[in-house]
Image: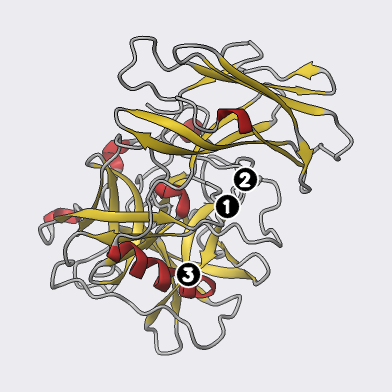
Amino acid sequence: MKLVKGLFLFVSVSTGWVLVSSGCVRRTYNSNPDIVSGALVEEKDPVYLSTVSLNWDGKPNCTGFVLDKRTIVTAAHCLATIPGQVSYSVTFGSNNRSLKETVLVPVKQVMANPGWDRGDLGSKDIDPMPQSPKNDIGVIVLSEDAPEWVKPLPVKEIGDVSPGRDVVIAGYGQTRAMPGDTPMPEFSGFLRKTTVKLAKVNDAGKELMWEAPADNTRASSCHGDSGGPMFYVEDDSKLTVIGVTSRSYSAATDCTKMGIYTDVRKHMAWIRSTKEKLASGVVSTQDWLHRYFETKEGTKIALDFKLISAGVEYLADEVWINVYNPVFSGSEVTSAKLSSYINSLTQQEVSLKFAGEHRFTGKFDKFKGEKVCAIASRWGVKQDVSIQVDGKGLIDPLSGGEAFTFKFCN
């Protein structure tokens, strides 16, 4: 049996110096993982009783684990959305052999970690275990309690974890990987698990790496498993939560080499404070939004922005651009131009500053307070962004032009 991976979504939500990917939209760096070479999870299994499927507009998208009766923990990249366009819900139970009837619970609030740094996550072969935290973790607060039969497994907050030990990974992703990393929704919705080895603990980056055991090189997480749990197998064979599925180690489409998980233990203080704020309704769910592009030359571009609701419109708040390529040394002269055609042209060109780690960044101050969605406007919602490096425009591989067209709001 295969446990299939889900697309990995990587988003950065801090100061805008980030590169994110979203998994469901063209030009995002898909990475929702599924479990490969896994087995269907039975209803009495502790994994079944503590692992959930996350849905966008009623469709399975990611995986998460139950922290308590009102709180789900998942990956930050699973929580990127657009104002008023996406509804979240959580499914308890699995389609596995018509076991326990599934229960759908609506979501009250969601929050991606504000320090989520997608960085180079679009190119999964680059910097697989970074020394700076990517913070790919998020919190969901439910609108009502989880079903009574749900039994959360504890997060391992005390005691060390040892590389070489068995860990169990689980997810609701696709049951088989397809050529080109193509999602196959009809194979989603079945909870599967597999056992792999903990290969490395990256304390600086607050991440964990697993690798398939020698006798099972096909075991892995893949499309749809993003946000799913990594369970540490204790000496008494009991399971404790230590990780959340973040991304694949490499760009390989079969999802079978290695995987990177966010170290949940290092984020428990943030998780606890965030769930309390979300439960009380004090934290906005739309702090940062993102659009991602990849150029013909392999450069990754991310537009990170905040929006302000203004009746039927949305106005821009902060708008940042991030441009990444592993060949960037910092000596390049790089600029970006953002154009919006809402009613009248708003346009700004900025010189980008080198931010280290092969990334240039800049802020479009002119767009603050400008209409960028025009939800009720007959003039449409066209915007585009163009980048120049050393006087040469970067090419969109889809259009063949130097402008990457997008919408602030769908």
Q: CA distance from mark 2 to mark 3?
A: 20 Å
Identify the coloring.
Answer: secondary structure
Residue 316, image x, y percentages: 49, 33
In the picture, the disc for residue 278 is none
Check disc 2 and give the amino acid type: Val
Comparing marks 2 and 1, which lies closer to the viewer? 1
| Camera-nearest residue between 131 and 37 | 131
Residue topped by disc 1: 14
Q: Is residue 110 visible?
A: yes
Q: Secondary structure at mark 2?
A: loop
Q: Residues within 10 Å of mark 2 (few under 14, many from 20)?
A: many
Residue that label 2 marks = 18
Amino acid marked by disc 1: Ser
Q: In 3D space, how far apart are the residues under numbered discs 2 and 1 (Cα atoms)?
A: 8 Å
Residue 223 coordinates in the image, percent (x, y): 42, 45
* Residue 177 in the figure: left or right of residue 149: right
Q: Residues within 10 Å of mark 1 (few under 14, many from 20)?
A: some
Could you tell me if the residues under marks 2 and 1 are in contact, i.e. CB atoms within 8 Å? yes
SS class, disc 1: loop
Q: Point out which mark residue 270 bears.
A: 3
Q: How many marks?
A: 3
Q: Residue furthest left?
A: 101
Please state the horizontal and vertical placement of residue 114, each as a whole percent of the image: 52, 56
First along the sequence among labels 2 and 3: 2
Residue 215, relative to residue 371: is it above or below? Answer: below
As rendered, which of 341 and 159 lies closer to the eye?
341
Of the numbered discs 3 and 1, the one sitting upstream in the chain is 1
**Residue placed farthest to the right in the image?**
331
Quarter holding the C terminus is top left
> Looking at the image, do the residues carrying marks 2 and 3 touch, with CB atoms under 8 Å apart?
no
- Distance from disc 3 to disc 1, alpha carbons, whole Å, reads 14 Å
For the point 64% across and 11% down, which residue is it? 401
